[in-house]
Structure formats: C-alpha cells, structure tokens
Image (tube, helix red, strand yellow):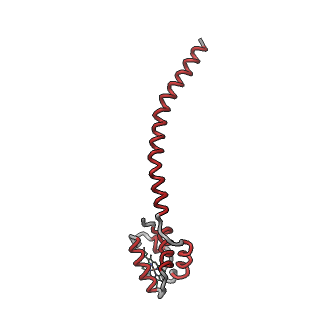
C-alpha cells in the first residue's frame, strides 16, 4: 500500500511537473526569442554611438569649459539642450564665448563626452 501510494505520489508529481514545465519552457523560449532582437538592437546602437574619444573630450572639456559653468548646467532640471544638434550649436556658441577654436576632431571628442556622460541623445 505504502509503495503504491508513493508510486502514485511520484506519478502525480511527475505529471504535475510535465504539465507545469511545458508552458514554462515555452514561456522561457518566448522570452529568449524576444530578448535576442533587443540584444542585437543594443549591440548595434552601441556600435552606432557617436564617433570620437570620450576621455579626450573630458580632458578638453575640463581644461576649457569650466570657467563659466560647471557640469551641473547639463543636468539641471530645465536644461536647455534637447537634441544632438542643439548640443553642437551650444558648443559652437560656448567655444566662441570662450574664445576657443576646436578642430572638428576635438569637437567630436567633446560632444561625445557630453552626450555619453550627460545628455544621451540617440
Ligand atoms: C564664457 C563663458 C562660457 C564658457 C567658457 C563655456 N560656456 Fe557653456 N554656457 C555658458 C552660458 C552663459 C550658458 C547658458 C547658461 C544658462 O542658460 O543658464 C552655457 C550653457 C551651456 C550648455 C547648455 C546646458 C543646458 O542647458 O543643457 C552647454 C552644453 C554648454 N554650455 C557647453 C559648454 C562647453 C562644452 C564649453 C567648453 C567648450 C562651454 N560650455 C564653455 C557660458 C560658457
């Protein structure tokens, strides 16, 4: 009797397991299938990130851009820059005010630093 009871219990458990696992596996498969395009998208967008050298951008920024404001202007609640183009224009205006001329490569470095670190425009 004990044996049969145990056997039944094991069978019950097994049936239950199978019944539970199949949809679970399917759900997991769906999740994996959904995850793959997201991961590909993230990889591609990481590769499509701005050109330039962020570390060099930070160096140029810290040496040239902190006379009138610090980095808090980039993150203040009502900051005025809302796009990558806007950021480029502001950098031009500020460079002009700062009487600095940056080469196209240096400009790219600074924009990359500001965008990667603060703005995160796509
Ligand atoms: C001569 C002074 C001066 C210098 C130097 C200067 N800025 Fe500015 N910057 C300003 C002023 C003024 C504002 C506008 C602040 C405001 O709107 O309250 C500003 C705003 C900005 C903003 C907009 C922040 C926002 O609201 O999102 C960015 C970006 C910026 N500066 C980048 C730079 C960079 C990069 C450099 C170095 C190349 C630099 N600035 C150097 C004066 C300067």
Asked if 54 appears above or below 21 in the picture, the reply is below
Instruction: Name the image quarter holding residue 7.
Output: top right
Instruction: Name the image quarter holding residue 87.
Output: bottom left
Asked if 28 appears above or below 15 in the picture, the reply is below
Q: Position of residue 56 (x, y in %)?
A: 56, 75
Q: Position of residue 99 (x, y in %)?
A: 47, 88
Residue drawn where x is 42% and y is 65% of the image: 122
Quadrant of the image where one finds ligand 1: bottom left
Q: Can you see residue 5? A: yes
The quarter of the picture where the N terminus appears is top right
Instruction: Name the image quarter holding residue 3.
Output: top right
Residue drawn where x is 46% and y is 37% of the image: 26
Q: Position of residue 29 (x, y in %)?
A: 47, 40
Q: Position of residue 91 (x, y in %)?
A: 44, 79
Asked if 16 appears above or below 47 in the picture, the reply is above
Residue drawn where x is 41% and y is 82% of the image: 93
């Amino acid at each position: 009797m004990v044996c049969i009871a145990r056997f039944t219990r094991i069978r019950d458990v097994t049936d239950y397991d199978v019944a539970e696992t199949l949809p679970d596996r399917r759900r997991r498969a769906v999740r994996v299938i959904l995850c793959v395009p997201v991961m590909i998208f993230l990889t591609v967008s990481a590769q499509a990130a701005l050109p330039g050298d962020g570390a060099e951008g930070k160096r140029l920024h810290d040496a040239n851009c902190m006379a009138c404001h610090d980095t808090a202007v980039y993150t203040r609640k009502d900051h005025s820059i809302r796009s990558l183009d806007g950021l480029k224009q502001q950098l031009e205006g500020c460079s002009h005010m700062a009487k600095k001329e940056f080469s196209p490569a240096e400009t790219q470095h600074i924009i990359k630093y500001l965008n990667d670190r603060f703005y995160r425009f796509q």
